[in-house]
Amino acid sequence: MAEAKDTGGYVVGSNQTFLDAPEKASGSAVYLDDLQMAGALVGRALRSEHVHARIVSVDAKEARKVDGVVAILTGEDLPGHPRASTHPRAMPIIAWDRVMYAGDVVALIAAETAEAAEEAVGKIRVKYEPLPVVVDPEESMAKGAPQLWEGGNLLNQAKIRKGNAEEGFRSADIIIENEYRTQSVDHLYLEVESGFAAPLPDGGFQIWNPTQQPFPVRQNVARVLGLKSDSAIRFIQTLPGGGFGGKNEASIEISVRAALLAHAAQRPVKLVYSREESLISSSKRHGTIIRSRTGATKDGRLVAAEVEIYLDKGAYSASGGDTPPAFKRATYHAVGPYDVPNVHVDVYCVHTNHPYGGQMRGPGVPQVHFACEQQMDQIAEALEMDPIELRRINGLKVGSRTSANQYLPESVGLLKTLGKVEEASGWLKRNGSSRREADGRLRGFGVASCMYGTGNAYSPAEAHVHLTRSGKIRLAAGVVDFGQGSKTVLSQIAAEAMSVPFGEFEVGVVDSQIDPFGGTSSSSRVTMQGGKAVYLAAIKAREELLRLGGHLLEVDPEDLDISNGVVQSKSHPETKITLSEIAGKFVADEMKQIGAADHIPPPAVMDKETGLGEPYEVYGFGTQAAEVLVDPDTGEIEVVGVWASHDVGKAISPMGVHQQIDGGVYMGLGFCLMEEIVQQEGRMHNPDMHGYLIPTVEDIPDRLETSIVEEHYSNGPYGAKGVGEQVTCPTAAAIANAVYDATGVRFQRLPLSPDRVAMAIAGKKN
């Protein structure tokens, strides 16, 4: 492995064209709704008319008479009333006794045409008995609140008790205390939820889905259909048209529903939701109520932090069951990337009659960072200290301990990200800028930092390396590339380890007949955990190529090396053989497995009484600065500049990292300024792309400058950590701090919509 250094050098660290770029750029990419199959039926779902109600009866007699209707399923047709997962509070595949939010499915239809399916939906008669509704997570915990679940509305609670918070506050010279609220947000991916299922002659089923978690889809379809083994399900990935965490839970539900219809009809069924269905029913970023109290001494040292968080879980549990990702991450990121000796955190995950809270890019962390990073700015203002300097004084570094008392022995690049943003943005010169434009708009600057636990402790990964008949290398890692470039990055890792040119690699869609278990494509785990499995498998594949080459060349493998994809003798370089020549002798079928390995991450160990321990194996860090112009009359905010720097361990693909940062900033901007699920008594009032606003090209900052910090992580492939989620975490706080700098008005509730901003500025004047 002459070129494969600990930090890369052969392919790792270079910019390679993404493997899926040609098909996406040419328009030849095939998405699920493009799939056609002879005899396939159209699936449809009938959803609840009520937010919370008892189902008295479901009458589908007239609907079954519609010409072209092949199958109709209601809750009473499903023995055992299966749910999307085995958790007792998971969403029912079809509600049978009660609906808990406006997105609940009460019947499924399969018909020859979309028109017949829609007609049948309109002819199903459901009688409901309305029940009381609860929509505020804090009120949901109050005595006398409507009980959504036996045992109470609290799904789970967590805490951190580090040091003695009250003693810490007694030693503080300044204490800042505030309440913050963040809204529920949709993923609004271009491709809505969709699933395709077909019965197989042997009694099994084939499932197609653009999910982020192929193997849980397979498991749950097999469970609900009552099949003896997951192997009875062949899962084939279709190209996802966006994910951001939303195609985790929702992909299970729609796959199971399509499979149930296919089972009932004994024909293939395609089920694709409408945009309105997607917005009303799919998982959302958890809305939050956050109360923060932070104490510091006059020299800027943080001495205590107390945080109370309420997460709106919505009607049902989802990924993680009792410990959903947003719940865990909100707990361990509540204090931000700072060294605080005394910490008191309480987090409550509470059911309401809203759409269920699920995974969304950085689950739980953008919300808590919106609060803690504004707390930091208010401390800096009270102490007349520069906000970046305050963060530099308290920022985590090698040898620090987190709020959970986790020791950080390596890979802590926060201070470097602060320095890069300070320099790139001209931060120290900002006060020399004009604070009022000729058109009356006010200029402001803000900064925010972040930390993000990379990967999942409970998420092992496997990888297989194959030599194809044509002499190419095919990777099978069981993880989904939904736009983040995973296929490319994993191929770069393998190319580096094997000393084989990047162009010789192939990565297909995830196919459960070929791919091993790779875990979910979430939690910023693919590069670090999936990539480590690929690295280990590639090392074994390299050894196997040397063994096979030695056999054909009649040379001791110890005397062989691989250079540029050619196996050759070290002592006699003219003695060599190509991969295609090796394939010609040893690949009898389409491909031959030449390497396999798994990677099992270290466990998460936390004390139940105090919450202290090691919730994540390593953390990513970042800093972003924002420059805004605010119209004090209309409340409109223009983000004119963002400077973002993130520590990713090692940038396997620098281009890919820069693109991830860009995309994270755009999503953070939307979260801050405009995106919101508008709900009243549990009903969504903007279930379309006219009413639900997201950033367009007009909203993108004129200046968006990104930089990469590489603080090597010893257990990552070539030092890599994750990057996909941390990049969206500090953006909203940086913009909010900039708006305060411009207007003198502190906003503690998102989004910063023009009406809310204009009214607050007017209120200050009055």
Image: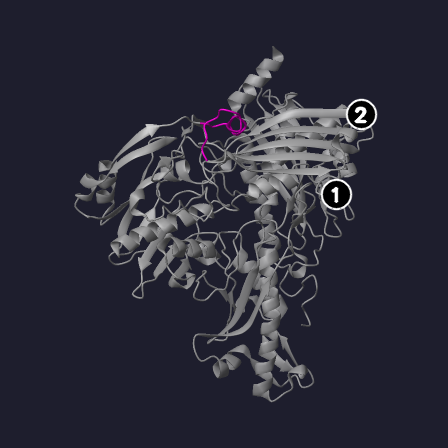
Residue 727 in the image: above or below residue 500: above
Q: Is residue 72 visible?
A: yes
- In the structure shown, which secondary structural element does the residue marked by tag 2 occupy? loop
Q: Mark yes or no: residue 29 visible.
A: no
Q: Nearer the viewer, residue 19 or 609?
A: 609
Looking at the rendered structure, the kind of residue marked 1 is Leu
Query: Quadrant of the image for the C terminus?
Result: top right
Location of residue 596 in the rendering, given as x and y in whole percent from the top left corner: 56, 70
> The N terminus appears in which quarter of the rendering?
bottom right
**Residue under numbered circle 2:** 173
Q: Does the magenta run of residues contain 85?
A: no
Give, as a three-letter code, the residue at label 2: Asp
Residues shaded magenta: 134-149
The image quadrant that residue 549 belongs to is bottom right
Q: Where is residue 288, by image quadrant?
A: top right
- Residue hosting label 1: 396
The residue mark sitting in front, 2 or 1, is 2
In this rendering, position of residue 179 left or right of residue 245: right
Residue 294 is left or right of residue 595, and the answer is right
Front residue of 716 and 633: 716
The extreme top residue here reads 766
Could you say where residue 502 lies in the image, as x and y percent from the top left? 56, 66
Q: Which mark is residue 457?
A: none
Q: Position of residue 363 (x, y in %)?
A: 56, 41
Q: Mark 2: few, some, or many residues within 10 Å (few <14, many ≥20)?
A: some
Would residue 142 appear left or right of 332 to someone viewing this image? left
The residue located at (30%, 51%) in the rendering is: 261
Disc 1, SS: loop
Farthest residue, direction bottom: 554
| Residue closest to the eye, 286 or 725 | 286
Q: Residue at x 64, y 47 (%)?
A: 453
Main SS, magenta residues: loop
